[in-house]
Image (cartoon, rainbow, N blue to C red):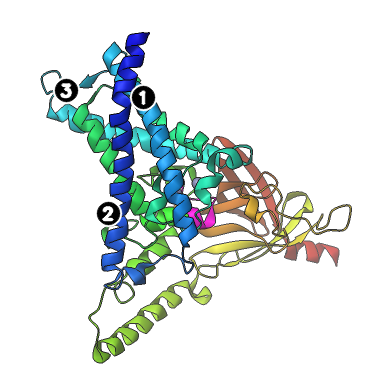
């Protein structure tokens, strides 16, 4: 027992210094890049109009230093595990070669992304959010300093990943070091506040499977979407990617809006012209008149609980659905019904009538429509497939995790005709 304590205590200072240094170096590096290239183009890639305050940054730094301390408390256990032979950390290449180092590192990143997606989503559950995850979301406009800005319980959850992974997969010491570096770099890039990824990271491009600053910034801004850490796979698979992600990323990295241009009156003029042509193009793409609006109109949900209007979305492609009428629009005391089950407490004061519950509905390859539907009854967002199953009838199927619900909606026109 004494020996274990001795191994733990002799490993801890190094682990603590490394975890703290990793954060400070990573965040300082990103903050420096932002400062150096701000006027040379990054200013035009700023993602939110709001600015983080000095108090925000102070809170982020203090919480992150605390997290590095907690990481080191669990990280030193890894040294004990290695000493005792509970886990294996290769020190040389004799037992496992370079191929193993690269392969195990890739596996570790994929496993970490999976672990992060699911614990992150769980921490957004209304019963867990306040205790675990609220501290991180105090940063509505994140800065690189927010990288480790977690409450103590959330820090413990994240710190548990490395020891858990090592129980199953032996790693090289070098692989663990690389993992630590990649993890902090991706983390400060995600919280940079201005898009620092090139257009090659755009959805559909060759690096499009990676997350970007826009991706995680939208998570901080909007809450319910984009839970992934390194990759977009889980968000796409589970239907939790923000419907505006592609449009926002493309707009922010497209030339004319984002590419740094040398100063000068002539250039400024050109830039304005290019900017307005491009803005015109974007507007045209999102112009409701150009949208495919096959399902547009008013629909009555099953059991006549609500009337939902389907119409082209304001700023994104596809159709959006807004609640126009509710059977139970007010409660017993005559107060309008609110979005009280929302997992994001900040959104619970929204009135249900007027709430947009369907978004990004576009035609899918199998003849139906696909988008996302928010169910105010359980505060969950479902991946929705919509099919027109008759002249006045839609079948809506929404799935979250493995639970699917099906509903038939009827056109209000048919109802009006029947009432005549
Ligand atoms: Zn979150
Ligand atoms: Zn974050």
**330 sits left or right of 347 in the view:** right
Image location of residue 404, percent across then percent down: 60, 39
Image location of residue 260, percent across then percent down: 26, 74
SS for callout 2: helix
The C terminus sits in image quarter: bottom right
Q: Which residues are magenta?
A: 219-226
Neighbour tally class for label 2: few under 14, some 14-19, many 20 plus, Cα within 10 Å? some
What label does residue 29 carry, if any?
2
- Ligand 2 under 8 Å from disc 2 Cβ: no
Residue marked by disc 3: 91
Say which of 368 and 99 sits in front: 99
Residue depth check, mark 2 versus mark 1: number of the one nearer the observer: 2
Q: CA distance from mark 3 to mark 1?
A: 17 Å
Upstream in sequence: badge 3 or badge 1: 3
Image location of residue 262, percent across then percent down: 22, 81
The image shows residue 126, relative to residue 157, as above or below, that is below
SS for callout 3: loop
Query: Is residue 209 visible from the viewing direction of this image?
Result: no
SS for callout 1: helix
Residue marked by disc 1: 163
Q: Residue at x 44, y 39 (%)?
A: 66
Say which of 249 and 420 sits in front: 249
Q: Are marks 3 and 2 in contact (CB under 8 Å)?
A: no
Q: Residue at x 41, y 81 (%)?
A: 280
Q: Is residue 224 magenta?
A: yes
Q: CA distance from mark 3 to mark 2?
A: 29 Å
Neighbour tally class for label 1: few under 14, some 14-19, many 20 plus, Cα within 10 Å? some
């Amino acid at each position: 027992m004494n020996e274990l304590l001795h191994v733990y205590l002799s490993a801890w200072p190094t682990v603590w210094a490394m975890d703290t240094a990793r954060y400070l170096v990573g965040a300082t590096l990103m903050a420096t890049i932002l400062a150096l290239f701000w006027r040379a183009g990054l200013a035009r890639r700023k993602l939110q109009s709001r600015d983080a305050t000095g108090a925000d940054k102070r809170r982020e730094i203090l919480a992150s230093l605390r997290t590095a301390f907690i990481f080191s408390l669990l990280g030193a256990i890894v040294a004990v595990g290695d000493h005792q032979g509970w886990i294996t950390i290769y020190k040389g290449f004799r037992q496992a070669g370079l191929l193993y180092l690269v392969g195990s590192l890739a596996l570790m990143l994929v496993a970490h992304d999976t672990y992060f997606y699911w614990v992150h989503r769980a921490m957004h559950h209304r019963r867990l959010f306040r205790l675990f995850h609220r501290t991180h979301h105090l940063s509505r406009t994140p800065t690189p300093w927010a990288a480790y800005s977690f409450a103590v319980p959330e820090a413990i959850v994240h710190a548990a990943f490395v020891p858990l992974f090592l129980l199953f997969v032996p790693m090289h010491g070098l692989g663990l070091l690389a993992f630590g570096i990649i993890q902090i770099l991706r983390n400060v890039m995600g919280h940079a506040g201005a898009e620092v990824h090139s257009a090659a990271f755009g959805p559909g491009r060759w690096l499009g499977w990676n997350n970007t600053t826009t991706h995680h910034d939208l998570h901080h801004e909007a809450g319910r979407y984009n839970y992934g850490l390194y990759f977009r796979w889980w968000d796409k698979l589970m239907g939790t990617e923000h419907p505006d992600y592609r449009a926002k990323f493309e707009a922010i990295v497209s030339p004319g809006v984002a590419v740094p241009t040398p100063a000068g009156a002539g250039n400024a003029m050109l830039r304005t012209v290019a900017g307005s042509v491009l803005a015109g193009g974007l507007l045209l793409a999102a112009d409701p008149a150009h949208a495919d609006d096959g399902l547009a109109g008013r629909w009555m949900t099953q059991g006549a609980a609500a009337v939902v209007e389907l119409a082209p979305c304001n700023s994104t492609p596809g159709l959006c659905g807004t609640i126009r009428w509710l059977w139970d629009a007010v409660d017993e005391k005559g107060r309008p019904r609110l979005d009280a089950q929302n997992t994001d407490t900040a959104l619970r004061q929204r009135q249900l009538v007027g709430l947009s519950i369907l978004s990004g509905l576009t035609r899918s390859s199998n003849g139906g429509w696909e988008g996302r539907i928010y169910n105010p009854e359980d505060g969950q967002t479902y991946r929705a497939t919509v099919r027109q199953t008759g002249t006045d009838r839609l079948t809506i199927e929404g799935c979250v995790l493995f639970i699917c619900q099906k509903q038939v909606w009827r056109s209000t026109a048919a109802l009006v005709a029947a009432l005549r």
